[in-house]
Image: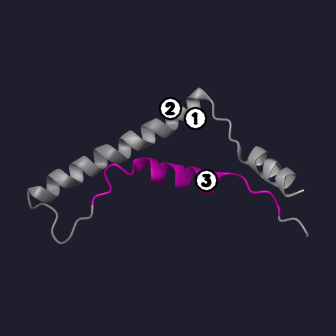
Amino acid sequence: MALEREKHIAERALLTIDEAQLMDLYRRMVLIRRFEDKVAEMYSRGKITGFCHLYAGEEAVAVAASMAIALPRAPPRAR
């Protein structure tokens, strides 16, 4: 019973992403990286003051999280 339940959950979790969506995700990651690089450059030149915490190398996290938030949700089921 538990194994069937886990299999069902795993099947529902599978996402199908077409090539256009993958390219959109890639473009978003590149945009974030370019922004980070520019922020680092401006910070090192003193154009940005205070503390600057860069997110370089973590672009996929932000893009995946925003994609997950945008996914349609199924209504909650009664148990």
Q: Nearer the viewer, residue 47 or 37?
A: 37
Determine the secondary structure under disc 1: helix
Residue hosting label 3 = 68
Please state, as top left, top right, bottom left or bottom right, where the N terminus lies in the image.
bottom right
Q: Amino acid at mark 2?
A: Met
CB-based contact (under 8 Å), mark 2 and mark 3: no
**What is the spatial separation of the Cα atoms under label 2 and label 3, in whole angstroms?**
16 Å
Quick check: 70 left or right of 60? right
Residue hosting label 2 = 23
The circle drawn on residue 36 is none
Mark 2 closeness class: few <14, some 14–19, many ≥20 residues within 10 Å: few
Image location of residue 46, percent across then percent down: 9, 61
Residue at point 77%, 47% (across, down): 12
Image location of residue 17, percent across then percent down: 63, 35
Residue at point 86%, 51% (across, down): 4
Q: From what the image shows, is residue 45 above or below residue 79? A: above
Q: Point out the stretch of residues depicted in magenta.
A: 54-75
Determine the secondary structure under disc 2: helix
CB-based contact (under 8 Å), mark 1 and mark 2: yes
Please state, as top left, top right, bottom left or bottom right, where the C terminus lies in the image.
bottom right
Q: Amino acid at mark 3?
A: Ala
Q: Is residue 65 magenta?
A: yes
Residue hosting label 1 = 21
Which residue reaches farthest left? Answer: 45
Q: From what the image shows, is residue 34 above or below residue 54? A: above
Residue at point 31%, 51% (across, down): 56
Q: From what the image shows, is residue 49 above or below residue 17? A: below
